[in-house]
Image (cartoon, rainbow, N blue to C red):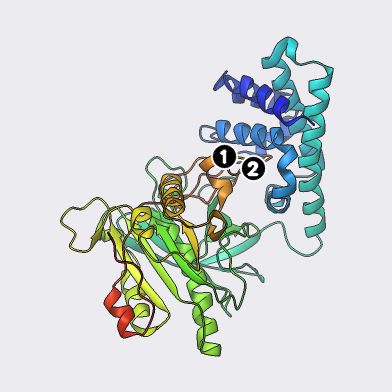
Amino acid sequence: MEENTLQRSWDRVTTHGEQVPLYFYSHLFVSHPEVRSMFPLSMANQRDKFVNALGRIVSHADQLDKDEAFLQHLGRDHRKYSVVAEHYNAVGASLCATLMHFLGSDWDEDLAAQWTAAYQVVARIMVEAAEMSSDSSPDWWDADVVCAERRTMDLTLLRVRPRRAFHYRPGQSVSMEIPQRPRQWRYFSPANAPRKDGSIDLHVQQIDGGQVSPTVVRTLKTGDVVKLGAPLGERLTRREGDTRELLMVAGGTGLAPLLAVVEQIDHEWQRTGSGPLVHLLHGVRMPWHLYDRPRLRQLAEQRPWFDYTEVVSDDPSYPGTRGKVGTIAAKQLLIGRTAMVCGGPQMVAHTLEQLTSAGMRPEDIKYEHFYYAAAGAGLAQPEQGTTRDAHQPPRIALPDAPIDPGRDISAPDAGSRRRQGLRVPRSAR
């Protein structure tokens, strides 16, 4: 496969804009009407994201050795849609038909062979992963809603309990389908480390115009039954017992996966008496969006290894630290630390730029890079909302789900760290 050839041809196709997904879905549903029921009734938010992700991933098939684990996750995750190998054939055929339609005479035998080979690499990885996982896990997990607490005007803290064992690592994401919105799966990150009772906390902020998050915030209630997909993502996870100091930078409900990692560390500290130093910066637009402030402040008072900083970006009357989270994070002590960054795409991109400009090595910064198009990293660019209406990785086949959160952040209380005998970061300039 010639990487540049595939990329150039896909770039030419995308110049036709919305005609591309319209043609693709028309071809798919006419030639394989049986797959229509796998997609949401409304395709308004589905069309562009799916086709763009599909085209970008296949046209970068030469790079899949770096992201094979991600595709394996996607393959396993697609089981919740009842996707089987023949559906990949249907999608591949419609992709090729779309390419032929928009490329015209440039769609020759050689180019068709390259696209076919690339798509088969992607499909094979996903199908094999799905088949291997089918013997050990269900297609999805039914979970009872045990609590739905409206924490702010537009944010609900949801607690669900899967009816069978559900294993995930702190920092991963899970997809969820609610009964009020069938076939519209959205990604969220558990905000807690695994518990003995199996319950999972999810932070759901309403996205204006969203198809799922407003319903979760307004109407999902105790007693409802939701479906959960397999956990996904590795880049925000942490190895048990890792002693490297952490600088955590969260925007909005991007706080959730970082809270799960903090809880993991707290469990280790309570069990062994030791753990890495952690500085968590939580950035929001307005101070009332600091929805977990009491718990985090209490934790900072009770744990010598934990420091917590609140940052508000859009309220000039706020008496605490103000500004963009990336800017404030870059003024902290960076040497010898690993950064974990989670939030909306703009917040993440800005934070990455600020941290690297301040001298932090890119390999010391962890974030789910397939959500973002920063510096060409990642294979696809799914849409991102303003707060976890979904942690949305690109899907190679079938249904849709939006994405994540975000905003900006602040500097630490140096005095409290001195009183605790901890290292004091550089003060904010």
Q: Quadrant of the C terminus?
A: bottom left
Asked if residue 182 lies left or right of residue 152, the reply is right
Q: Position of residue 10 (x, y in %)?
A: 66, 25
Residues 391 and 166: in front is 391
Q: Position of residue 345 (x, y in %)?
A: 46, 45
Residue at image point 44% right, 73% down: 278
Q: Gap between marks 1 and 2, in whole Å?
A: 19 Å
Q: Secondary structure at mark 2?
A: loop
Q: Mark 1: which secondary structure? A: helix
The residue that mark 1 highlights is 376
Q: Nearer the viewer, mark 1 or mark 2?
A: 1
Which comes sooner in the sequence, label 1 or label 2?
1
- Identify the residue position indicated by label 2 in the image: 395
Q: Residue at x 39, y 60 (%)?
A: 156
Q: Are marks 1 and 2 in contact (CB under 8 Å)?
A: no
Q: Position of residue 419 (x, y in %)?
A: 30, 85
Q: Amino acid at mark 1?
A: Gly
Q: Report the amino acid beneath label 2.
A: Arg
Screen quadrant of the N terminus: top right
Q: Quadrant of residue 250?
A: bottom left
Q: Residues within 10 Å of mark 1 (few under 14, many from 20)?
A: few
**How many marks do you count on the picture?**
2
